[in-house]
Image (cartoon, grey):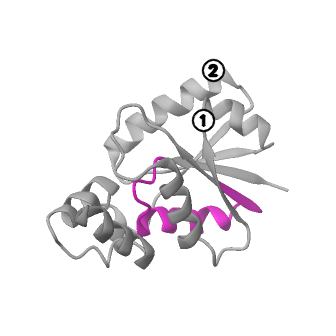
Amino acid sequence: MKIAIYPGSFDPVTNGHLDILERALKLFDKVIIAVAVNSAKNPLFSMEERVQLLRAATKRYSHVEVDSLHGLLVEYVQQKKATAVVRGLRAMTDFEYELQLALMNRKLFEQMETVFLMPNEKYTYLSSNVVREIARLGGDVGKFVPSVVVKALKQKNRS
């Protein structure tokens, strides 16, 4: 069985993330979405909330698991016996950052492969940061995220 890990902060999950997931499911037998802590970010949603939102947003996919990731990605990949890591690329700036991470991960675990997937062009501008900002300012994010995320953002912004 070919297993891929799709890591990210997913704060919140967007339709662009789901587009990458669907592309990965065409290549792998199973995709594990690993919700990670990014020390450079101050998340709106807790780890538990992000995991729950992803589980709700991906429940229609039979070969998807959602998990939390604590520690090194390379160790998680080995633990899950995955064959690759999936990363989405929207622009050249994503590529430079993702390439650096992929090369470092390969130094830490030589057998680890990283597969870069491009989303549908309608998602190339989309990011969790932009979604959070639109929602914070009272804008409609329904075109950009699953309905469960729309509800969660409204609740967060009321608090």
Does dot 1 land on a helix, a strand or a loop? loop
CA distance for labels 1 and 2? 20 Å
Task: Locate the C terminus by quadrant.
Answer: bottom left
* Above-or-below relation of 92 to 121: above
Q: Which residue sits furthest front? A: 159
Q: Name the residue at 45% across, 54% down.
A: 10
Task: Locate the N terminus by quadrant.
Answer: bottom right
Does the segment drawn in magenta span residue 19? yes
- Write down the residue under mark 1: 70
Q: Which residues are magenta?
A: 9-32
Q: Residues within 10 Å of mark 1 (few under 14, many from 20)?
A: few
Q: Residues within 10 Å of mark 2 (few under 14, many from 20)?
A: few
Q: Which residue sits furthest right? A: 1
Q: Name the residue at 40% across, 35% down.
A: 97
Q: Which residue sits furthest top? A: 107
Left or right, 78 with reference to 72: right
Inspect this view and state whether residue 117 appears.
Answer: no
* Above-or-below relation of 74 to 143: above
Which amino acid, mark 1? His
Q: Name the residue at 36% across, 75% down.
A: 151
Q: Percent position (x, y) of residue 18?
A: 50, 67
Does the segment drawn in magenta span residue 125? no
Q: Percent position (x, y) of residue 80?
A: 77, 43
Left or right, 145 with reference to 2: left
* Above-or-below relation of 103 to 98: above
Which is more toward the observer, 111 or 136?
136
Which is more toward the observer, 93 or 46?
46
Does dot 2 land on a helix, a strand or a loop? helix
Q: Quadrant of residue 92?
A: top left
- Write down the residue under mark 2: 107
Q: Name the residue at 41% across, 79% down.
A: 147
